[in-house]
Amino acid sequence: YCPNDSRASTLVCAIDGAVSNYHLQVKTNTEAECLVTNGKGKVVGVKLRWRDSGTIETLKAKTYIIAAGAIGSPVILIKSGLTGRSGQVGRNYMYHCGALAAGLFSQPTGGADTFIKQLGFTDLYFGSGDFPHKLGYSQTVPIPGHLSIQENLPVPIPDAIAKFLLKRILAMTGFVEDLPQPENRVEVTNTGAIHLVHKFHPYDIYRSRYYMSQLKKVMRHAGVVFMFGATGDKDDRHTAHQVGTTRFGTDPNTSVLDPYCRLHDHDNVFVVDGGFMPTSLGVSPALTIVANALRVADYIKETC
Ligand SMILES: Cc1cc2nc3c(=O)[nH]c(=O)nc-3n(C[C@H](O)[C@H](O)[C@H](O)COP(=O)(O)OP(=O)(O)OC[C@H]3O[C@@H](n4cnc5c(N)ncnc54)[C@H](O)[C@@H]3O)c2cc1C
């Protein structure tokens, strides 16, 4: 959370203004449970549950917009029985098969405070001459604090050494556009819990390994003293960059949303978050999600 509003968050750019000027009501500590349909292709209500009391309230509107993220939105659709003709709701769950190289240098790198995300390159976006496969871009990533370094080393080290190391580390990540696979999915169990199923395709892992080797090469050229690398496939707890679970398209038999992110079979419902993407991109997803949301908002304003 940005302490001085410099970062253009949704709260600063949209929500505060909409509350003051357009009568937006924000209900915190409240979850959307499911949508209610009339059985004739229209949604006629949304059930909200107050977390504290468990009270359920149904709100009614002309148009409904779900923006609960690539995990939350398919869950709401599944609980509502709005799974459409495609069978793709919750499927094609993706989150980048990234690669990482972290190096220790003899000089301070600024990696923990100055160059947190500022260094990057797109040279390998489409692969390279000897590796003609789509990858994605590369950038420096924040170095975790000294406590995290201590936690992850095989031997205990004092605070002062951890802080000394912290100043001399630089980490770079490479994004690898992972493939959409229907078996990778968000499910709702019989008890209503969310269950995620995900396994990277061998082609994703192949490209991630190549990217790691290239990042290490960059580190070597920069004079690294010691380094280690990691590939995305080992990161089974990764939860950033989720996309793909309500993919858009023109054919209701193969996609969940139409090109304006409207549910194919219920024309007064839009899903506007990372779920619409049919592929995972070779860049971080947030700006594309925002750009698409603005595009869809214009459409809703004109047509609904
Ligand atoms: C640690 C981390 C670092 C990241 N760094 C970057 C970065 O540097 N650049 C970048 O481009 N992207 C980054 N991302 C990814 C980016 O944050 C996401 O891709 C983006 O926020 C997804 O937007 P969204 O609208 O799809 O969903 P979200 O931003 O997740 O919004 C969904 C909202 O819906 C709410 N919700 C879910 N279910 C319900 C429900 N049933 N009822 C009511 N509300 C519900 C959630 O609480 C959440 O507030 C990062 C993500 C993480 C986790």
Image (spheres, rainbow, N blue to C red):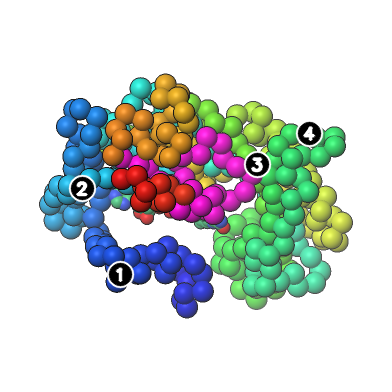
Classify 10 Å Cα crowding around label 4: few (below 14), some (14-19), many (20 and above): few
Residue at position x 65%, y 69% in the image: 112
For the residues marked 4 and 2, what is the alpha-carbon distance in whole angstroms?
50 Å
Determine contact: label 1, label 3, CB under 8 Å: no
Residue 234 visible in rendering: no
Residue extending farthest bottom: 4
Residue 221 to residue 243: above or below: below
Q: Earlier in the sequence, mark 4 or mark 2?
A: 2
**In the rendered structure, which segment of residues is drawn in magenta?**
269-294
Closer to us: mark 1 or mark 3?
A: 1
Q: Amino acid at mark 1?
A: Asn
Q: Amino acid at mark 2?
A: Ala
For the residues marked 1 and 4, what is the alpha-carbon distance in whole angstroms?
51 Å
In x, y percent, where is residue 119? 72, 62
Classify 10 Å Cα crowding around label 3: few (below 14), some (14-19), many (20 and above): many
Residue at position x 54%, y 50% in the image: 288
Residue at position x 47%, y 49% in the image: 295
